[in-house]
Each structure stands twice: as structure tokens, then as C-alpha cells.
Image (cartoon, rainbow, N blue to C red):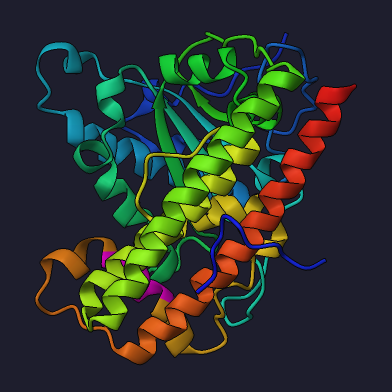
Amino acid sequence: MIDFRNHHWGSGCARSPKFLARRKAPGNLSLPKRANFPKILGHMRTDVDHLPASKQRELERIVEILFDEFGQATENATGRRKGARILKIILFGSHARGDWVDAPLSANQYKSDYDILVIVSQKELTDRAAYWAKAEERLIRAYTIEKTLRTPVNFIVHSLHEVNDGLAHGRVFFMEVAKDGIAIYEADDRELATPKPKTPEEALATAKEYFDDWLTSSQDFYDQAKHAMEKGRGKIAAFELHQATERLYACLLLTVTYYSPYNHNIAFLRSLAEGLDRRLYGIWPEDTHRERAMFQKLKEAYTKARYSKHYNISGEELIWLGARVEELGRVVHQVCSERIAQLEVAARR
């Protein structure tokens, strides 16, 4: 199997409506009407006029679901959590920039997700299992089963302090959100902190450190998966392949943007990574139901391969998944190496 570490690859801005004040009438969660808001330094955009009306309605629905489930998760809160609040909901990524790609479900083509950042008032409220699991389930169901959403949704949750800390430390991810993001809900007029980009030397050192650490970690889990396969321990091998995949995506995200969400959902990490570089798309074939099911089986391995007696995976399936993880390692190595080379040039200037 491939050694990822040593392998040399071939060639005055208007505000969004205060939705919180109208929580009892979700149907009134209207987004801003047509207007041309200027992009003012320190002020986040609130207009979504570049999106089709159907997508604007979908964003309304997404905001409604997030508030509904967050409200239910916190309705019996005590102590500090009684003041639990959603401060901002920000659309970022391709749908905010205007370069999204749509494709039918039946086509094996890249399809842009809605990328959403939810900013909450307290760090404790970022606990996904405690506060956001139901919202995630509803959004998945709305897309895959109910078909009330025609675009998949990925959302991350951070406290305002975490976001501002990321901006203060020059994390590219948060800087891009602050620059290109669109606030589709704001509780008040508070702004995000002013970004402080890293120096070229800091950027290079940080990227190299992330690349070396996470690529090494992914290789370790990959090697453990190979050993488990040789011993006929299929469940262990599946879990180790999941961990190798998770760490490869984290390697790319951290090397390129200095950020990766604390999330074991490799489908979510995959979506973020594919949004950064299209070479990552196609690593997981989706032409057939069997191919799509294979990635789902790998995704489920994080929990089920360890705890469910009903989780089964064959040697043939492990070999197929192992080959895809090898390809993912090759592409991640290539993309990250190119990024570091760019940073080296910038640091020498």
C-alpha cells in the first residue's frame, strides 16, 4: 500500500430581518428583499439576490429548521445555558461567492452543498450531539427523503469567541467566511473581529506542521488497516480505514485553510475538501448504488464497526475501499505539496 508521506507523485450596510423576534411565526422568516448592498470593510453582506428564488426559499427553510431544533434542545436549559442564543447564521462557500455547481442526483457530477456557519453565544452550545443532532437529521431527511430541499446542507457550529479567535490568528477558513460570507440571520449588529493574516513565514511554518503531522497520522491508521486486513479482522480494518480517510481530509483542510471542524463525519469533511479543489471529486465513484453504498459503509464504520454486531464488511469490500483511500492519499499529497510550494515562494519574497 502507498506511503502517503514519502511517495513522489507523477506529474453602512443593511441588516437581515431579526428572525428571532418572530420565532412563533416561522413562515415569516423572509430573507432580505432585492437591494444592492455595498461590501463595506468590517460589515458582512446580507443580500442573497444572486441566488434563484428557489434557493432563497430553501435558505429560509434551513434557518427555520436550525432554530426549531436548537430551541427544543435548549428549552429546559438551566444556569448559563438559559441565555443560549444563535447570534449569526452565515452562508459561505460557493453559494455565497456565486460559483456553485448544480447537478441532478442521478449524475455522477460534482454538486455544491449549502455551507452554513452557525455562531452561538457560548462554547457549550457547539456540542453537536447535545444540541444539533436533530437539526442535522432533519436537514438530511429534507434532502434525501422528503425532497423539500434540492441541495444538501452542511453546517458547522462555533461560538463567537472561537470565530474571532480564528480571525485573530489568521486562519484562512474564517477569513474567507468573513470576506465572502452572507449573514442570513443576525441577532444584533455586532461585527466579527478584524482578521489578522499570518505573515508569509508563519503561514508556511503552520502549513508544513499540519501537513507533516496529519499525513503521518493518516499513514499510521492506513498501515494498521492493512495489518488488520491481513489478520482477517474486518471491522477493525474498516474503522482504521475510516480514520485514515478522516485524517487525510483534515490534513488537506488544515494545510490549506488552517482549519478543520471537529467532526468524524467523513461525508461532511469530504464536502469541504472537494469545495477547495475539484481534483478531490471522483475519488469515490458514484455511478452505481453499490459504489455509493461503499462510501456509506466506510462512513458508518466510525461507530458501527466498533459497537454493532450487525456491521459486516467483506475482504473484497475492504480491498476496494483501501484502493480509494490510496487514491485520496495521492491527491491530498499533491494538493498540499502545491500549497506549500506556493507558500515557500511567498516567504522568499
Q: Main secondary structure of the magenta part?
A: helix
| Towards the viewer: 266 or 26 | 266
Give the residue drawn at x 32%, y 20%: 85
- How many tags in the picture? 0
Residue occupying the far right of the picture: 349
| Towards the viewer: 207 or 94 | 207
**Image side of residue 24 versus residue 94, left or right:** left
Residue 199 shows in the view: yes
Q: Is residue 299 magenta?
A: yes
Give the residue drawn at x 45%, y 84%: 320
The x, y position of residue 334, in whole percent, is: 70, 57
Q: Quadrant of the C terminus?
A: top right
The x, y position of residue 112, in whole percent, is: 63, 58
The x, y position of residue 317, in whole percent, is: 37, 86
Give the residue drawn at x 37%, y 39%: 262
Report which quarter residue 168 is drawn in. top right
Which span is picked out in magenta?
A: 295-301
**Image side of residue 15 versus residue 99, left or right:** left
Residue 112 shows in the view: no
Q: Where is 82 relative to 305, above or below?
A: above
